[in-house]
Image (spheres, rainbow, N blue to C red):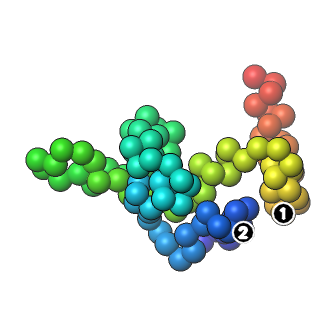
Amino acid sequence: MPEQLQFPFPSLDFPGRTTLTAAEIAARLGWDEKHVRDLITEGELPGIDGKGKGASRGSYRVPAESYRDFITARITGQRRIELLRHLPKPVLRELVRELNEFLKN
């Protein structure tokens, strides 16, 4: 299993969890649950729809990794640089290689 990097915002993390509900994410971020469900249905926040037959709305579960990726991708300002400083050098080199390849196309 790959090593999990330390989450940049411990106050927003859910240690030991594998999946999260839209309600849990909304409460942690101070958002409306509908907003989180909208992010899931629009594909911005990858989730799993466990809606049963006859249910009026989805019963979403978001993998903890998807939640962490979602938050990390939206880090702004100086925290973005601080996050990069915590990445191992081989990961940074691979990231540079991937970015250079992406920018060529």
In the displayed structure, would residue 30 be above or below residue 11?
above
- Residue 94 picture location, percent across and down: 81, 50
Q: Is residue 93 visible?
A: yes
Residue 24 marker: none
Q: Is residue 34 left or right of residue 16?
A: left
Extreme left residue here? 54
- Residue 33 picture location, percent across and down: 41, 49
Q: Which type of secondary structure does the marked residue at label 1 adopt?
A: loop
**Residue on which the image places disc 2:** 6
Badge 2 amino acid: Gln
In the displayed structure, would residue 60 be above or below residue 88?
above
Residue 86 marker: 1
Extreme bottom residue here? 16
Q: Residue at x 86, y 56 (%)?
A: 82
Q: Is residue 64 left or right of residue 34?
A: right
Return the disc, 1 or 2, that comes first in the chain's sequence: 2
Q: Residues within 10 Å of mark 2 (few under 14, many from 20)?
A: few
Q: Residue at x 70, y 63 (%)?
A: 9
Q: Which type of secondary structure does the marked residue at label 2 adopt?
A: loop
Q: Is residue 76 left or right of residue 36?
A: right
Q: Residue at x 86, y 49 (%)?
A: 78
In the displayed structure, would residue 86 be above or below residue 16?
above
Quadrant occupied by the C terminus = top right
Q: Residue at x 31, y 50 (%)?
A: 49
- Residue 26 picture location, percent across and down: 47, 54
Quarter location, residue 101: top right
Badge 1 amino acid: His
Quadrant occupied by the N terminus = bottom right
Assess whether mark 2 and mark 1 are in contact (beta carbons under 8 angstroms): yes
Q: Residues within 10 Å of mark 1 (few under 14, many from 20)?
A: few
